[in-house]
Image (cartoon, rainbow, N blue to C red):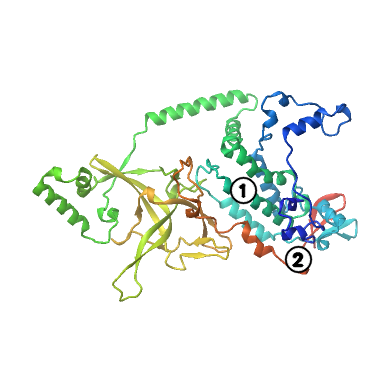
Amino acid sequence: MGHRRFLPPDHEFVFDAESFDGSEEHRAAPIAYAQSAVLDNIKSIKDFEKSKTWKCVSGLFSLPYWDSNLLRHNLDIMHIEKNVCENIYRTLLGIDGKSKDNFKARLDLQEMNIRKELHPQKKPNDKYYLPAASYTMSKKEKQQFCKVLHDLKVPDGEVSAKVLYIEDLEKLEERIIMTLCRMEMIFPPGFFTVMMHLVTHLATEAKIGGPVCYRSMWFVERYLGKLKSNVRNRAHPAGSICEAHLADEAMVFCSKAHADEVTSKRRVNPNTLEKIQNETFHEWFKAHIKSLEEKNGIDSVENDIRWLARGPVSAAKRYRGFISRGFRFRPKRLDKVTQDSGVMLTAKTSSYAAAGDATPVLDDVTYYGRVIDIIELNYSGQFSMVLFECEWVDVFSEEGMKKDKYGYTLVNFSHLIHKGQKIEHEPFIFPNQVDQVFYVEDEMNPGWSMVVKQPKPRDSYDTGDLESAADIESESFHVSHLGGMLKKKTNDQHWVRTNIEGTLVDSNNNAPTNEE
């Protein structure tokens, strides 16, 4: 609680007492003390045994740079996001003994004299009835919520950004405060633990310490988890880890020694691969290049054009994965734990204003699909081309693509186009033409999936010649849109969800029982 202190003094939330803790917030934001001021305060203490704050002078102050050190504590974002996430889903799901909405939390509301609709109601046999809060979910809603989390697959290599912009971090600082204030209007005061407050410092620390990926514990925790998973004999854990490590090294050696790729003997249709609408273009192209060679000699035609006209060899390589522009792509059949098959392509597409119109109009159209296969065409050893074969959603029909009320794009893979059945179909694309997306099933709209775009490819760096922030597609829904959803009049606030039964708890036991 108390995050309104970080808002501007004229913000509407500062004067909204009923939506928060029952009082207006006119205190200034806390000031971060400099190290020199802290050291002066510590040195002024004559008897540390009587001090309630400091017990000794830290040896860190002996370092020559410590007085001017701005990043005194490197917050571990991994554990912060873990605890914040657990706080949210445990409270939403009402997990016994883990939810922050419990009997003690309701007593806090009663003591603070706020949200009277949520106060515990005394029942016979020393029990209390806790009304269902506005964020309480029904059993069906909990199942839908858990199913979305269980079925969620994100692309491989989800990592923190390696390049940060100061203006983005400053906006993020403001949005973090606004998000926490919005959450104070929803959840009880007991929800806001120390970990919830530490989120306010993450963007500030990033401005000083740089990207999180260079100062986090993720890779350490992942490697420790891998080592622990190798323990098969608890009596000799070190021996188990050593044997597993030797086995992994042996497998890597064998896989590299026998890494010959197997080619599939199948004839590739050159008409489809050229992705043209003219059925005779490839024949004309081949004949035209041949006539130029006969007329002007072989040297009159560039080598790549000459071999391209002859077409690829009949045997093509088939890949299980391919990395393009930092994105790792895999065919849909290999989407097990991660989801690396989603693609998005924006292309110029011709359309006609009317059926009798002979003049096509070019316009940008965004296509959504999934990679089905990855093949490499070999042009007689001179050069090769890698192509993605994809299944594309029908983006021209409302049955294939639509927008929900929050602005998110929903797609339906039961309605496809460009299936490759006709010569004008174009299921193949080049890897450098697409961006990676992943799809999340929408439980509220069966058969539909929400499109989530990758914010940035893995292992990419800003060399100072990238597109401006205005040219980058931003998220269609963020915390700023919550204002219109949560802004209510004081006499129109409802803290209780009436269509769900509350719980009965014992006064000395927080374990809930079903209300009959």
Instruction: Verify CB contact (< 8 Å) between mark 1 and mark 2.
Output: no
- Where, by quadrant of the figure, is residue 279 drawn? bottom left
Counting from the top left corner in percent of width and height, residue 349 is at 36, 63
Please tell me which residue is depicted at 79% across the width and 30% down the height of the picture: 40
Label 1 vs label 2, nearer the camera:
1
Q: Residues within 10 Å of mark 2 (few under 14, many from 20)?
A: some
Report whether 427 appears left or right of 328: left
Counting from the top left corner in percent of width and height, residue 27 is at 79, 51
Please tell me which residue is depicted at 46% across the width and 67% down the height of the picture: 399
Report whether 173 appears left or right of 103: left
- Label 2's element? loop
Please tell me which residue is depicted at 14% across the width and 42% down the height of the picture: 299
1 or 2: tag closer to the N-terminus = 1
Counting from the top left corner in percent of width and height, residue 515 is at 80, 61
Counting from the top left corner in percent of width and height, residue 252 is at 44, 29
Q: Residues within 10 Å of mark 1 (few under 14, many from 20)?
A: few
- The three-letter code of the residue at mark 1 reads Glu
- Residue in the foreground of this view, choosing between 363 and 447: 363
Alpha carbon of mark 1 to alpha carbon of mark 2: how far? 34 Å
Residue 170: numbered disc: 1
Quarter occupied by the C terminus: bottom right
**Residue corresponding to mark 2:** 494
